[in-house]
Amino acid sequence: MESEDDMIDDSVSMEDDFYSGDLSYCYDDPNDNDNDYYSDDDNDYGLLEDDDEDDQDAMISRRPQLSYTVLKEADIKQRQEDDISKVSTVLSISRVEATILLRYFNWSVGKVHDEWFADEGGVRQSVGLLERQFVQVSNSRELTCGICFDSLLRDNITSAACGHPFCFSCWRGYISSTINDGPGCLSLRCPDPSCNAAVGQDMIDKLATCEEKEKYARYLLRSYIEDNRKTKWCPAPGCEYAVDFSVGGGNFDVSCICSHSFCWNCTEEAHRPVDCDTVAKWILKNSAESENMNWILANSKPCPKCKRPIEKNQGCMHMTCTPPCKFEFCWLCLGAWAEHGERTGGFYACNRYEAAKQEGVYDEAERRREMAKNSLEKYTHYYERWASNQLSRQKALADLNQMQTVQLEKLSDLQCTPESQLKFITEAWLQIVECRRVLKWTYAYGYYLPEHEHAKRQFFEYLQGEAESGLERLHQCAEKELNKFVTGDGPSKEFDDFRAKLAGLTSVTKNYFENLVRALENGLADVDSQAAAASGKTTSSKNTGGTSKKGGRGKGGSKSGGSGRNVDDTGN
């Protein structure tokens, strides 16, 4: 029997559309308790859809629904309790034992059931759930503690399911030390080194302090998320929401109600349509020392004596290494400055470098320096645009928040229009925020696109350019043209024209980015298919032409005669 958690490993289709509904969930009030679960079914998470309801229904029916649910702490506790109750009822065991079983099997109810019914005895042995007490204790009034070896009344001695007797004081010290050590306390065992008996939450509740009980409960709650393969915490700093992800959707981008969007697969910020491997390489490149080395190679030369890199910061070619080396040399040829004079062309016009270059002396060093310089220029080109779109997105988020909290109400009063009819402005800003994110990651994609695939690069840059151009028009319209209506003195006759323009630009930009995302997720396969079609058409044309030509030659003649004719045509 295959458990529901094993389904996570199944292949996930990546062919669904990129945009999947309204993004206004990003700004929901986290304190709103109207719904227990913040499910994807509660909101439409895509960008703009057509006003036509039939078209909208058609779009929704064609794309898979988002497959995640954002959970608050109360939701997590409820789910945890439900799973414990389910296992306890089905297996006819206590809730404490059910909790220990679920912890051992990473909170997978299906896995617990499968393993238990397949080999109950083996599971009990592995987990430490004993069916009966195996340590025989005397019936005397006093018992000896197995840790401090004090003889105490039976009322001051207790034990786990195994029966090993320990005094309350030793138990408290053992439990306190384990809880303060961290989440390992959830796998607590009998203090006897030879015993595998599990110690459950009932012993914690009986002997631990209030503070220790709270810590234990917190560890237990967090384990439900961190050990469960279907759930993860939102990685945003300070966020205490979790996300339950289910198989069925091809989109790994997840949006928490704290407004942070991230990739479920790698937990980096949402980066669709770029794959996780590309994102990992790009982030590593941005943070690694590789670009420092590239800069050093491109803008410095090693001292001929001590080999330390030196940057040329003045005009003349006379270089002096820093102490203690102090070697003086020529920047051009790296030769000792003492050897330079009129015979080499003068101190400031050394021609030995050009002569040596022609002889091939500096070819390898120059080649490496040129490669480093080109690599640095390429990286700088893509990084600057990646970072610029990131900053633009952050500014757009701030503008969106300002629009929603202050300006919409003011605009509604000035234009005598209900706020419900100004939704097109919010939708435009949401489109801008999302498109800035997509555009940012396309520059990481472009950086790693192979240089030799010229057709793909041209197609990618065309799609990227069209999308970026549309986004800039939309952003300018929402940012600057809207301002005159917000700062105006009263209703404007031009507002309806502005409404139509902004809504139109939003729709056009959405289409541009849908095309761009679809192409990148398909690996720019359209280029390969078009090339294959063109190649097939050319081959077919040649074959058709050759057949008709050969048929003409053979018409009315013998086979041997036809062959002789062909030989004559070659020039013999």
Image: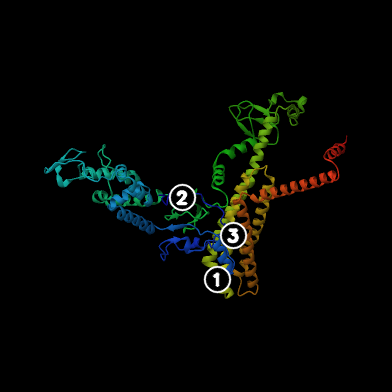
The residue pinned by badge 3 equals 432
Quadrant in the picture for the C terminus: top right
Earlier-in-chain disc, 2 versus 3: 2
* Numbered tag placed on residue 295 in the rendering: none
Quarter of the view holding residue 380 = top right
Q: Which residue is rendered at x = 44% and y = 55% of the image?
A: 243
Q: Is residue 493 left or right of residue 114?
A: right
How far from the left and from the top, in percent, is residue 101? Answer: 32, 48
How far from the left and from the top, in percent, is residue 12? Answer: 51, 51
Badges 1 and 3: C-beta atoms under 8 Å apart?
no
From this view, report whether residue 343 is shown above or below residue 68.
above
* Numbered tag placed on residue 410 in the rendering: 1
Colour treatment of the image: rainbow
Q: Amino acid at mark 1?
A: Lys
Badges 2 and 1: C-beta atoms under 8 Å apart?
no
Q: Is residue 256 left or right of residue 202?
A: right
Query: Quick one: 504 or 542, which is closer to the camera?
Result: 542
How far from the left and from the top, in percent, is residue 437? Answer: 57, 54
Q: Amino acid at mark 3?
A: Ile
Earlier-in-chain disc, 1 versus 3: 1
Q: Which residue is rendered at x = 69% and y = 26% of the image?
A: 335
Distance from the alpha carbon under mark 2 to that under mark 3: 33 Å
The residue pinned by badge 2 equals 8
Distance from the alpha carbon under mark 2 to that under mark 1: 48 Å
- Disc 3 residue crowd, few under 14, some 14–19, many 20+, Cα 10 Å: many
Residue at the left extreme, as displayed? 141
